[in-house]
Image: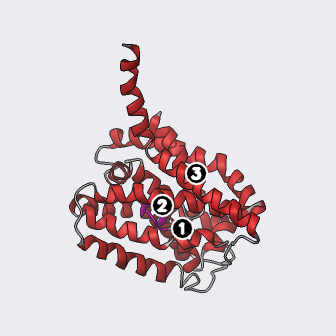
Amino acid sequence: MRNFLKGIVVGIGGIAPGLSGSVLLVIFGLYEKTVNAIGTLFKHFKKNLAFLVPLFLGFGIGVLAFSKVIDFFLQNYETYTRFAFLGLVIGTLPLFFREVRKNGFHWKYYIFILVAAVAGFSLFFLNRDLFPAVTDPNFLQSMLLGFAVAGSYIIPGVDSAVILSSLGLYETYVSALADLNLRILIPAAVGLAIGVLLFSFVINQLIKHFYTGTFSIIFGLFLSIIPNVLYSEAGTPCLPVGTTQLVLCIVLVVVGFAFSLFFGNLDKVVQRFKKSEPAKKS
């Protein structure tokens, strides 16, 4: 049940601008278990399935239940919504960095973070439209679409919207989902399945053998996409106009930051509460 509820929050993170669902898995301490379960799916099938089903079920419910809510706020209060998400994203940084350092940390890993952040910023922000838009993808391009989405889901800090925009596939992705275009979605699903298995296997091996280095690079990539939170899908910045809107945006950033910190430490809060209960009874 706990994994199911966390899956719902991860699903919300998966559709929120700039807030990667896989980053939330890292913060919840479920990322390693998830990529290991996917990467070794058929090796321990029943055990892995028992772990993944409630998590993915919660993820699906989170996406379906909150996609329209988030879309409503983005359509009607985009600036406020994006600043609230900016606070949520910034609030995940200390929690994410804690996970990066948990198996030991050396100053050299700051170089990993810096290089990954600069490379990610150059690719995801400065080259938002690296390739021309694809309006009528062939089978291989549709598979590439699914493969790119898989990579963004498995690798924390990689935003699917930014990746697809850089490849010229974002508009195709959105329209195919809206129109249920099976000619695009079926090969994309094949690419997605292959990509999830492949990326999970690779990331799982990297974490096992190079934990801190791998997570340092992932953390750097996550830092690089933060500026994209304040940019609309059209590529224009969403900035406050006037003093009142500026104050409200700052308040929303603070509230989002506080919410992320609280929710990220929720397990610790629950454990402390449980420990204090016997003392109260006695």
Kindly report the distance in space between the C-alpha atoms of the residues bearing marks 1 and 2.
7 Å
Residue flagged by tag 3: what amino acid is it?
Ile
Q: Name the disc covering residue 12, or none.
A: 3
Q: Using the image, determine if residue 108 lies above or below residue 204.
A: below
Magenta span has 135?
Answer: no
Q: Are marks 3 and 2 in contact (CB under 8 Å)?
A: no
Split into 4 quadrants, where in the image is the C terminus? top left
Of residue 221 and residue 11, the one placed in the foreground of this image is: 221
Of residue 152 and residue 178, the one placed in the foreground of this image is: 152
Q: Is residue 242 left or right of residue 162?
A: right
Q: Residues within 10 Å of mark 3 (few under 14, many from 20)?
A: many
**Helix, strand or loop at disc 3?**
helix
In the rendered image, residue 220, in percent from the top left (x then y), is placed at: 39, 71
Query: Which residue is under mark 1?
Result: 160
Q: Quadrant of residue 141?
A: bottom right
Q: Are marks 1 and 2 in contact (CB under 8 Å)?
A: yes
Kindly report the distance in space between the C-alpha atoms of the residues bearing marks 3 and 2.
13 Å
**Helix, strand or loop at disc 1?**
helix
Residue flagged by tag 2: what amino acid is it?
Tyr
Query: Which residue is under mark 2?
Result: 153
Residue flagged by tag 1: what amino acid is it?
Ser
Question: Sequence order check: which comes first, mark 3 or mark 2?
Answer: 3
Of residue 264 and residue 41, the one placed in the foreground of this image is: 264
The figure's colour scheme reads secondary structure
